[in-house]
Amino acid sequence: MVQLTIDESRCKGCGLCVRACPKKILELAKNKLNEKGYHPAQMMDQAACVACASCARTCPDAVITIEKE
């Protein structure tokens, strides 16, 4: 099982992780703003994540963590 976590409070909504995801299961939250006023990234389908870590490597602020059990 894969657990992808996004620290939404630190995410600046740049969208680099969304573009990097080969499964296209990340998107920027349209109806949510974090404390900084950005639309944070969010996972749409946790079960589809293959833990490739493309999103985590691409994130300039290191707000994404991936854990495999």
Image (cartoon, grey):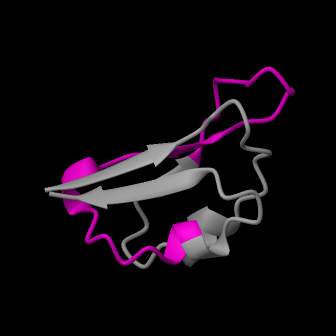
Q: Residue 56 occupies which quadrant of the picture?
A: bottom right
**Horizontal side of residue 67 vs 34, given as left or right:** left
Residue visible at 61% across and 65% down? 17
52 vs 42, nearest the viewer: 52
What residue is rendered at 76% in x and 65% in y? 60
In the image: residue 69, left or right of residue 68: left
Q: Quadrant of residue 38?
A: top right
4 drawn magenta? no
Residue 33 relative to residue 42: left or right? right
Residue 24 is situated, as x and y percent measured from the top left of the image, at: 43, 67
Judging depth in this view, the residue of 54 and 38 nearest the camera is 54
For residue 69, side relative to residue 59 (left or right): left
**Depicted 24 relative to depicted 9: above or below:** below
Q: Is residue 19 above or below residue 64?
A: below
Provide the residue span drawn in magenta. Answer: 28-56
Rendered residue at 65%/24% (across/down): 32
Image x and y of residue 16, in percent? 70, 67
Location of residue 62 with respect to 57 vertically, above or below: above
Count the numbered circles shown.
0
Question: Residue farthest to the right?
Answer: 36
Q: Toward which corner of the image does residue 58 lie, by quadrant? A: bottom right
Q: Quadrant of the C terminus?
A: bottom left
Which quadrant is home to the N terminus?
bottom left
Residue 44 part of the magenta segment = yes
Magenta segment, prevailing SS (helix, strand or loop): loop
